[in-house]
Image (spheres, coloured by chain):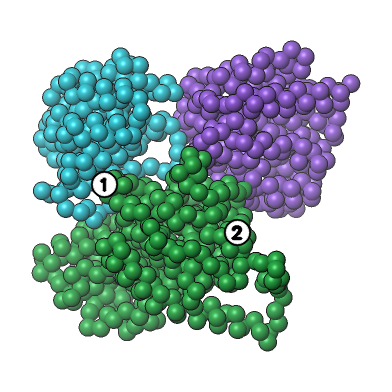
Amino acid sequence: MHTIATGNRGVAEAVREAKPGVIAAYPITPQTEIVELIAQFVAGGTMAGTYIPVESEHSAMAACIGASAAGVRTFTATSSQGLLYMHEMLHWAAGARLPVVMANVNRAVAPPWNVWADHTDSLSQRDTGWLQVYVATAQEAYDTTLMAFRIAEHEEVLLPVMVNLDGFVLSHTMQPLETTPAGDFIPPLHLPHAIDTSQPAGYGPLTGPEYYYTFRWEMERSMRDARQVIREVEEAFYQKFGRRYGPSEEYRMEDAEVAIVAMGTLGREAQVAVDRLRGEGIPAGALRLRWFRPFPRLDLAGREVVVIDRDYSFGFGGVLARSLQATTPCEPYSVIAGLGGQEVTYADIAGFVRQRRPGDEYWFGVDAGV
Amino acid sequence: MPVFEIRIHSRGGQGGVTAARLIALAAFYDGKQATATPFYGAERRGAPIVAFVRICDTPIRTCSQVKEPDLVVVLDPTLLPTVNVLKGLAPGGTVLLNSPHKVALDGFRTVTADLTGIALVLDLVIAGSPVLDTSVLGVLAKIGVITLDSAKRAIAENFTDARNVAAAERAYQEVAA
Amino acid sequence: MAEIPKEEFLLPTTSACAGCSSSLCLRYILKASGPDTVLVIPACCTSVIQGMYPKTAFQVPVYNIAFAAAASCASGMSAAFRALGRKTKVIVYAGDGGTVDIGLQALSGAFERETDFLYICYDNEAYGNTGMQRSGATPVGARTTTTPGGKTHPKKDIELIVEAHRPPYLATACSAYPTDLFQKVKKALAIPGASFIHILAPCPTGWKFPPGKTIEVGKLAVKTGMWVLYEREYGRLAISAPSKGAMTRPLPLTDYLSTQGRFAGITPEQVQELEGEIARRRERLLREVE
């Protein structure tokens, strides 16, 4: 199928291709179209699998954990408050080493209520042991959701994967989408520790101080191994479907002296800003980070860096900016923009670059620009 | 071809967002790149909403709101007193209005079509609301934003009721440019 | 019977859909409660109806809280007001989703602890605010965006669930009978402890009927017995006047179902199931009243 479709539809179509056995989900704006499409596909017989309309997000993740523990491929989707409500169970899914795939439609956190794009929801879950990837087009949403199942279920990973897409700006924006059938791209799930009544075991029982840390180390080991698995899966995807993805998407970075780093749709909007700045003689480039967990080691040597955070960690700073500072030598101009769907255009982004001051933090709309 | 930007004004439940999607789909069938973006929040009928369409020969990388539309579409004329539908429209820009009479807007080119009338004549009414989001494509075809063939294809793929294609054809015939 | 005051606590031209039951109910609820009231609302249509910052459509404080937490938030708030010696009325105003599904735990806890508050559930039988997905309160046969073929599981009986907590006052109401609702709210607020009112709120957007027919649809719900108006004071049942006729001579259920697009495609078996439920409930209530 080659058509115009929303980011949400891209996710739902990929889920249909992946053929999960159980989908347990709860509606929340702006994720609802994903859930509604899946319900329609299942009811209409075009999608195998059982759809459980659970009564809350905490229950959605709990149901996914139960289904996944039984050895069945599972999927759910949520946003914002829903993601926060399932926080405890996010830790659980990762700790239980279950390859649940979840689409999170990035939305601001209340109060006050706000339904528009913001990354605080998913970034505030960065410690849970979930892999996290951020997409910027409907095509990428489709492709990445397919890859997410294969990555999560890989024997060297066996960790859940969160696919993030910006609320409304991507979830509801219609763009060209080609849904190529997955074929055998995602092998059948073989969960080594699936519940087996012929080999009874206790799952997640009380574990003393002498053993607990070993489980946490195993999770981190798999998170590190995931880097290579992601590379392999993305290469296999390129070989089969002809579309190439990496840990980040770089635009005019080869000779860039200023790098604009962002995630999600702003990372693509930044490319338009780059063209504009180049026209003014400013050698800018854009780096759209895709995989946030495991966090990559980026090489930004010799460049000035302008980081756009569509999120904030209070008392600390923009999560992306601080993450970069912690992992690679750089002194970013940290821009906090786009919170709660705040409009950020390519003109604004070009402005951030022109006014940059290394090491400073700039709250768009609050601080005066230079 | 630089990006052609359209802003569509309507009320929730009138199909403004659907119209945007259909226009983008028709442009896509014309071989163009196209995006359609709504700007709305929690679902409710009757509230003013805005939707955007971008059409270009090259991939569209911006998702921000359309600030300087090339074309403004107003599906509900009762919005005119309360919403500044002309904001950002360049002098001489085109406004497409759902209206039974010709409307003059100083400094802008107006194109009117009685989309409500067409819906009522064809009895194309759903839950009390005349269907406007399919007929409007006929007007857009007449002014050359999309082709009529692609418009009909986009509509036929999304609506089983053949009156929707008929509505677009009627609008194409009847529009007063 | 208390007289209905003229003062309005909900400003006209809210952001509600045309024909919304909820804004009609809120006007009468607040007239019954008066200015010394706080509304605690979880995510629901009212979160939108109240209007966007920096404006509010309400003349009483409205406390917005997370979807699952309305009753527990109200529980804490009520305890605090009483500790301050204030008689401020705490009213939870929640949709069916926030009551029978995600809000059920908090509701149960608040009633078990005999919280001094009034919990009102306005029931449009779906998740209205997010675009009409099914809830536990969606009836059999109803089409929603997540039950495109019609819901197969029966409507959760929240009244029985709340009754199990032995509240001092429990009542049902319907937006088509606003004065009945007014009287019930007044009564509930006069009784200390946890009271519950379950309002049927026909929703033109979700149930797919023209916005001008909201009252008619509500009356048909009552006249067919699909919705029974009653009160329980300390458990003792009293059928409300508008439902008395339907207890002995209800209109055919199809009169109600045929007004709404959401029941298009309901099967004869599902209609029978609903009719059976209605008949069983009617018998149970009539036996009890004797």
Q: Say which of A127 and C31 sits in front.
A: A127
Q: Say which of C230 and C115 sits in front.
A: C230
For mark 2, name the chain: A
Give the colour in which the image draws chain B.
cyan
Element class at badge 1:
strand
Q: Identify which residue is drawn at 50% across, 44% down.
A: A42
The three-letter code of the residue at mark 1 reads Thr
Q: CA distance from mark 1 to mark 2?
A: 37 Å
Give the colour in which the image draws chain C.
purple
Residue farthest toward the bottom in the current orientation of the protein: A210
Label 1 belongs to which residue?
B35
Residue A67 tag number = 2
User: Quadrant location of residue B71?
Assistant: top left
Count neighbours of disc 1 (C-alpha within 10 A) and say few if under 14, some if 14 to 19, many if 20 or more: many
A303 sits to left or right of C65: left
For marks 1 and 2, give the one nearer the viewer.
2
Give the colour in which the image draws chain A.
green
Do the residues at pointers 1 and 2 share their chain?
A: no
Q: Residue C258: percent from the left, percent from the top?
A: 56, 19
For mark 1, name the chain: B
Task: Look at the image and tell me whether residue C74 can be seen.
Answer: no
Q: Identify which residue is drawn at 82% across, 26% down.
A: C284
The three-letter code of the residue at mark 2 reads Ala
Count neighbours of disc 2 (C-alpha within 10 A) and say few if under 14, some if 14 to 19, many if 20 or more: many
